Amino acid sequence: MSNMNRRDFLKTGTAALGTTILAEAASNLLPNGGAIANAAGPAPEYEIYAAKYGGTLVRNAAIALWNTGWNEEGQINFYVWAIKAKDGSVTLVDTGPSPELGAARKIPNYVNPIDVVARIGATASSVNRVIITHMHYDHVGNIARYLTAFPNAKFYLQKREFDFCVKDPVCERKPIVAVFDPPSNKVIAGLERSDRLVMVDGDFSIAPGLDLVLAPGHTLGMQVVRVNTAKGPAIVGSDLAHVFRGYKEDIPSVYIMNLPDWIRSFDKVKAMAPLEYIFPGHDVLMSSNYPTVAESVTRLV
Ligand SMILES: [Zn+2]
């Protein structure tokens, strides 16, 4: 399917949307890629929650919006996300950092993300999946505790993110390792042949209405999550943009691994959902502009 056709097709509705991604995912499945979901009938609807585990951090605005506002202050928060199904089962997105990392990196007002998501019922019995969008320390640095806290969960990660962080010595070089966490990389490495880890290579449908979308640029194997909601398709975009303005103005953060790829990922993801339902990684507005359902937890859609 050409890009243009694909874009038009994606706009035709969520049931069709699920079918599209499945057709593509089938060719992208790894041997351990898990079962292909049954796409018959309309996709179920999920709710998306943002769980703030740290912040607010004030720093230069240009960090979140590349080359913009070197003389301005900007604010960010730190989040993980929860995607709730109607039956109460929960897919978590990212782990946040461990308490030790939170302290070492001086994240203000840090609370273990496990304790924050528990406030909306994300517990050992309800969490069946954890999606890792990318392996920066503030997104995967709590992986060891998550493996224990959510014993029934399978963890989803892009193969190219795994390969870079686990197998490429360039990942250990100073400017790169500064935003990763080598001990967490080791934990992930140890899962390579475990049935806890589902290694994905490209776009992949986890279940009807719940799709992983490869979106490199911020890291080499960045992925975002496309979710069918009562409002239609929405994207848990993690750090594909740090703030809403990034999507609106086509500006990435300063943490760039491949800028042309990043721009192409913007195009790809923006074609999948309305701008107002594409959620960034660190915007303080996710805390202030949406209904609060528990302490530090808001319902985005
Ligand atoms: Zn990041």
Image: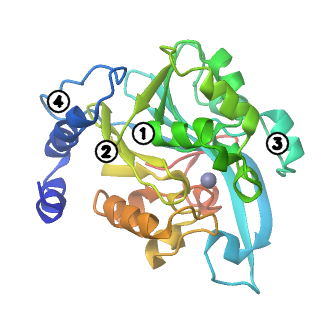
Q: Is residue 152 above or below residue 252?
A: above
Question: What's the residue type where badge 3 is placed?
Answer: Gly
Q: Are marks 1 and 2 in contact (CB under 8 Å)?
A: yes
Q: Nearer the viewer, residue 206 or 283?
A: 206
Q: Are marks 3 and 4 in contact (CB under 8 Å)?
A: no
Left or right: residue 1 versus residue 75 is left
Question: What's the residue type where badge 2 is placed?
Answer: Ala
What residue sits right under mark 1 in the picture?
47
Percent position of residue 42, x then y: 16, 35
What residue sits right under mark 3 in the picture?
102
Query: At 39% from the left edge and 33% from the top edge, which residue is drawn?
Result: 200
Q: Nearer the viewer, residue 25 or 287?
A: 25
Using the image, tell me which numbered label, if any, was put on residue 39: 4
Question: What's the residue type where badge 1 is placed?
Answer: Glu
Closer to the N terminus: mark 2 or mark 4? 4
Q: CA distance from mark 1 to mark 2?
A: 8 Å
Closer to the N terminus: mark 3 or mark 4? 4
Using the image, tell me which numbered label, if any, was put on residue 230: 2
Visible residue check, residue 52: no
Q: Quadrant of the N terminus?
A: bottom left
Percent position of residue 36, x then y: 24, 24
Left or right: residue 189 versus residue 30 is right
